[in-house]
Amino acid sequence: MFQTNKRKLLEDLVGRLVTLEGFSDNEDIDRKIQFLCFALDQLKLERGILRKEVGFEEYVQGNTSISGGRICISAAHTAIDPGSGIGSIHLQAPLLLFLLLNHKERYQVLEIIKSFIEEIRSQLTLLDFKKTRTGVTRCFTNTRFAANVLRDYGLLRFTKREAFKTWELSLAGFLVAASLLEKRANQKRPWYALDSERDWKFDLLPELRDACGGIASYDEFVAHLAAICKPDAELFKTFQPALRQAFALLQGYWAILSDQAKTHKERREASLERIKQLDALGDKFFQELSRCIQINDALRRILQHRENA
């Protein structure tokens, strides 16, 4: 990312180059930057250079400076591999946390992605904002990939109501996210995508696979869920038969997530079969669960640590 002084010089240059007329805020630098980007995209299209673009990595490795009213872009003396930003697998845990803390919002998918990216923006690099061949920003694409895997393993619901319009936590997703919240709430940066070594036998983070594997009894299951619910929630009385059935199904589900003998495809299929049985508990159960979730105390701790970070 640009250093503060370099960024200021570039903003000043854009401010002088671009004049806006007839808009609500003609001097808004953010608006000027966006319109300049559109003008350059139009120029690229008209010159027919969309298929022979400069590599984004080539720009990242070089150096950009501003002097005498000009932008100077210098090539790197020695080419290095700049990497590719944060992989989609490492966005799985932060995305689950984000969905837990915002579970009462009825955002559409695009709104979720934009808000999520803004939340983790401080840990992203320029490479995360590279546009892919489809024209979509890499971190947006990786967030979708992360959500697809979470949904494939049943941590996100995929019923007729959700379809592709929104992402909502399943019962398993609530439990895993609650476990993450408990473990990360006292960290200075609970949102961070932890850079753990990739285990290629699995496409789900170890942090998620192991989150609830230690729940051995129904009482532990209820206590784990109650930790993110309002005190004396009626859910645990009214839906006790459903909860006992859910616990029995989830015991096998946690084992499936960590089964090394299965392929990715086999684990996903076995996971979804369990989740389908959980979904059969009915929408009333999930609606009541969502209503009784109360994470204000945990959220307050996270916000406090973010302010002190």
Image (tube, rainbow, N blue to C red):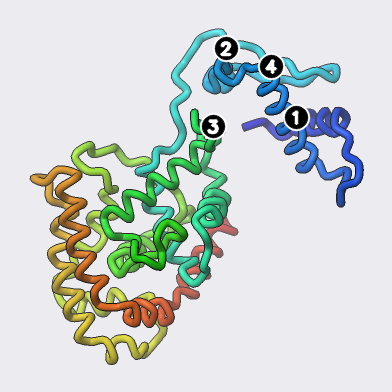
Disc tally is 4
> Label 1's element?
helix
Do residues under tags 2 and 4 come within 8 Å of each other at their CB atoms? no
Residue 47: numbered disc: 4
Q: Residues within 10 Å of mark 3 (few under 14, many from 20)?
A: some
The residues bearing labels 1 and 4 have C-alpha atoms spaced at a distance of 12 Å
- Of labels 3 and 1, earlier in sequence is 1
The residues bearing labels 4 and 3 have C-alpha atoms spaced at a distance of 19 Å
Q: Which residue is mark 1?
A: 39
Task: Indicate left or right for 4 with 162 as reference.
Answer: right
The residues bearing labels 2 and 3 have C-alpha atoms spaced at a distance of 21 Å
Mark closer to the observer (2, 4): 4
Do residues under tags 1 and 4 come within 8 Å of each other at their CB atoms? no
Give residue 118's position: percent from left, percent from top: 58, 50
Task: Indicate left or right for 216 with 19 as reference.
Answer: left
Residue 76: numbered disc: 2
Q: Which residue is mark 3?
A: 131
